[in-house]
Image (cartoon, rainbow, N blue to C red):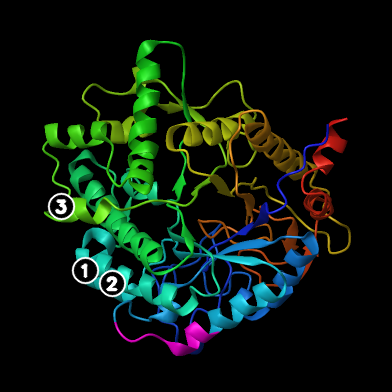
Amino acid sequence: MTKAFPKDFLWGNSVSSMQTEGGWDADGKGKSVYDIKTAGEHRSDWKVAIDDYHRYQEDFDYMQQLGMNCYRFQISWSRVQPDGQGAFNEAGIAYYDKFIDELLKRGIQPMVCLYHFDMPLALAKKYDGFVSREVTDAFVKYGIEMVKRFGDKVKYWLTFNEQNLYNTPGASTFAGNLKTPETESLIYTIGHHVMLAHAQIANYIHEHTNDQIGGMLAYQEVYPASCKPEDILAARKIDEFYNNNLLDVFTRGEYSPEVMTFLKDHKIDFDFRDGDAELLAPTRSDFLPFSYYRTTTVNASKIPAGTTPTYFLEKGGQDNPNLKTTAEWNWQIDPLGFRDIIDKMYARYRVPIFPIENGIGVIEHWDGEHEIQDDYRIQYHQQHLQAMRDAMFEDGVPVVGYLGWGLIDILSSQGDMRKRYGVVYVNRTNHDLRDLKRMPKKSFHWLQRVIKTNGAALDEEAK
């Protein structure tokens, strides 16, 4: 029997502002921490990206041709509030106002993400980012202002991209990345300040609008490397500390009891003050969004005695020998892991699930004439869509939609244009902007058929 997705299923694309927009100094935009990053051997600067600031209507037309009805994009904080604390830049706000109108005109629902790591440079220099509650307060004011400006047009909201990354050893401040156990307190402080900002904006949206918001994380799906009880325990603790700790706040308004007990027993001060519990308590999510690209395993025998769960994956992570990997970046391809996450999240929280980033990054070259034959991308998305559909129809999980990552080629998170996720090629390299021409790949036509049939085309391929 053919199993099409629900009629209101959301098909779409996700991006960040710094990876797409360019226009780094246009129309009163202030500098962000990305605007001062320099190019390297395999890294572009961020000044042009794919020039979406000037070419977004062309890209919206491609999305419309694909049949997409949802687009998750980011409002650049420094574009609408140049220094992050002072007056708002009306030219920047007008840009996003028109941007949203052009999406709606094409029948594409906008989903706004308020922050994707690109701190306004002025706040980074003055406060070292979310180390300070001053930045938390500034972000809440910015976020609420954006909801006031666009809440009548935007139904779906996110505060932070991949919010659990603030609770990992790679958590960043403007001064650098936090990598040593001595900074564990600061890691949890940053994560808590970010959560306080999310909670206040989520609660404002629920109190003052009919819009929907979800707390997003990069779900860390980590298997035990063996059936040894120590490996199983390490994998479970990673799930609790990296994933469930934030999901508990997103849906229940309080941190994981296991994590709070750990922090208390280890005397880790993370700036949890009187009144914070009351700010978090009302927090709820209308849907649970997450990003997913790969899985890994943890080997407890590699974790030194006394290591805290925060560092389990860094110390004990290893590849899964049962999975294929991407040739260039060794990311392990695991569609069943995708299904497992969807099932686990819904079983624990009973909130509709929404995967909003998924894709495969590959080095590709266009000869200037022939269509890129990216069968590997078709296979990747087909397998993940099938796994998601199994979670829906066989496991009973309500799924809101499916958003691929960067389905028009964009800079990678490291600024590397070689790592391409798109079904539309953008003609530029890290150091040569060329003509930025857009060119659909073979996967474009495949995805177009899948969306047009609302997923039923997946059955035709399975026969």
Which of the pair 439/266 is nearer the observer?
266
Which numbered circle lies on residue 138?
A: 2
CA gap, disc 3 and disc 1: 13 Å
Which of the pair 370/357 is nearer the observer?
357
Q: Range of the magenta residues?
A: 86-94
Residue that carries the numbered disc 1 in the rendered image:
134
Q: Residue at x 74, y 55 (%)?
A: 423
Percent position of residue 401, x then y = 63, 50
Contact between labelled residues 1 and 2, with CB atoms less than 8 Å apart: yes
Quarter of the rendering containing residue 276 = bottom left
Q: Is residue 242 left or right of residue 161?
A: left
Q: Circle 2 — which element?
A: helix
Amino acid on which the number 2 mark rests in the picture: Ala
Percent position of residue 122, x then y = 30, 76
Amino acid on which the number 3 mark rests in the picture: Asp
Q: Circle 1 — which element?
A: helix
The numbered mark, 3 or 1, whose residue comes first in the sequence reads 1
Magenta stretch contains residue 347: no
Residue that carries the numbered disc 3 in the rendered image:
271
